Image (cartoon, rainbow, N blue to C red):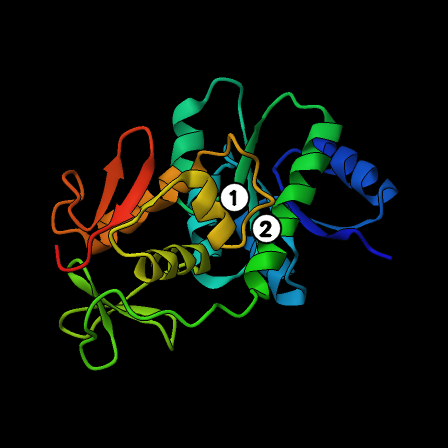
Amino acid sequence: MSSGRVLIVDDDQEVRDMLTEYLASHGYEVAQADGGKTMRAELERAVPDVVLLDVGLPGEDGLTLARYLRERYELGIVMVTGAGEVVDRIVGLEMGADDYIAKPFDPRELRARLKSVMRRTQGRAAPAAAPAVAPAAPATGGRLPVGRCLLDLKSHQLYERDGAEVPLTSMEYELLRVFAEHPNQVLSRDRLLTLTRNREWEPFDRSIDIRIARLRRKVEEDPENPRTIRTVRGAGYMFVPGA
């Protein structure tokens, strides 16, 4: 039985071959790509569970490719960065990566991260049915006002007030759904992970903060001074409808 399918995107042939041999020995189906062009060709052939994506690729770098992947595919993305490249790690998470690992790394740690990311993405692909909960605020044409946008809970889509669709990842939608179902309630990070069915995440995983920051840029009039999704210091976040 396969442990999952991984696509390694790295311009270093030795790194690709080493990781392919290691992951294949643990039951993974592994494909390789040396850059954006070959990555797209592999994606057309078969969509993997996780893409292991090197940040420092020549030409189209890993951050650009992470954005491309997140906009088009529901899969896991693990960024590989150079030691100490903190900014790249943060930007990678903002682009939609699920996790990152810094070189040089222990292949066992990489495998643990791949397993964790696969659990998350599988949970996103087949979420349990959400309980019926009254909407947080009066809907407008079947859509719930969320800051400067409208959330359609039936189609899982977010719209500008003029009707233009706002791109939304599945995790961002789950966060908005949970906030809409718990208006004016302080929700801790741990509670948000439970309610969005991402409980496999580690307790110290702060990428949820990055996702909320991205949501604020989409729904807030002034993301630097959020009024709709507010931070409650030391406690978590609170959705304030109509703010």
Image coordinates for residue 32, horizontal then vertical, percent: 69, 48
Quadrant in the rendering for residue 110:
top right
For the point 45% across and 31% down, the residue is 89
Q: Residues within 10 Å of mark 1 (few under 14, many from 20)?
A: many
Total numbered badges shown on the rendered structure: 2
Q: Which mark is residue 31?
A: none
Tell me the quarter of the image containing the C terminus: bottom left
Label 1: state its secondary structure.
loop
Q: Which residue sits at x=50%, y=32%? A: 56
Secondary structure under tag 2 reads helix
**What type is the residue that disc 2 sits on?**
Arg
Residue at far bottom of view:
141
Give the answer, above or below, for where 64 lies relative to 121.
Answer: above
Q: Quadrant of residue 222?
A: top left
In which quadrant of the rendered image does the N terminus lie? bottom right
Q: Amino acid at mark 1?
A: Asp
Q: Which mark is residue 120?
A: 2
Instruction: Choose the circle earlier in sequence order: 2 or 1.
Output: 1
Residue 190 position (above or below residue 143): above
In 3D space, how far apart are the residues under numbered discs 2 and 1 (Cα atoms)?
9 Å
Q: Does the residue at mark 2 contact the one at mark 1 (Cβ under 8 Å)?
A: yes
Q: Is residue 13 visible from the viewing direction of this image?
A: yes
> Is 176 or 3 nearer to us in this picture?
176
Residue shown at 39%/40% (left/top)? 188
Q: Is residue 59 visible?
A: no
Q: Position of residue 233 (x, y in %)?
A: 27, 30
* Residue drawn at x 53%, y 33% as measured from the top left: 203
Seen from this angle, which residue lies furthest top? Answer: 84
Q: Nearer the viewer, mark 2 or mark 1?
A: 2
Q: Position of residue 183 (x, y in %)?
A: 27, 56
Residue 190 placed where, x, y %? 47, 40
Task: Quickly name the residue at label 1.
Answer: 98
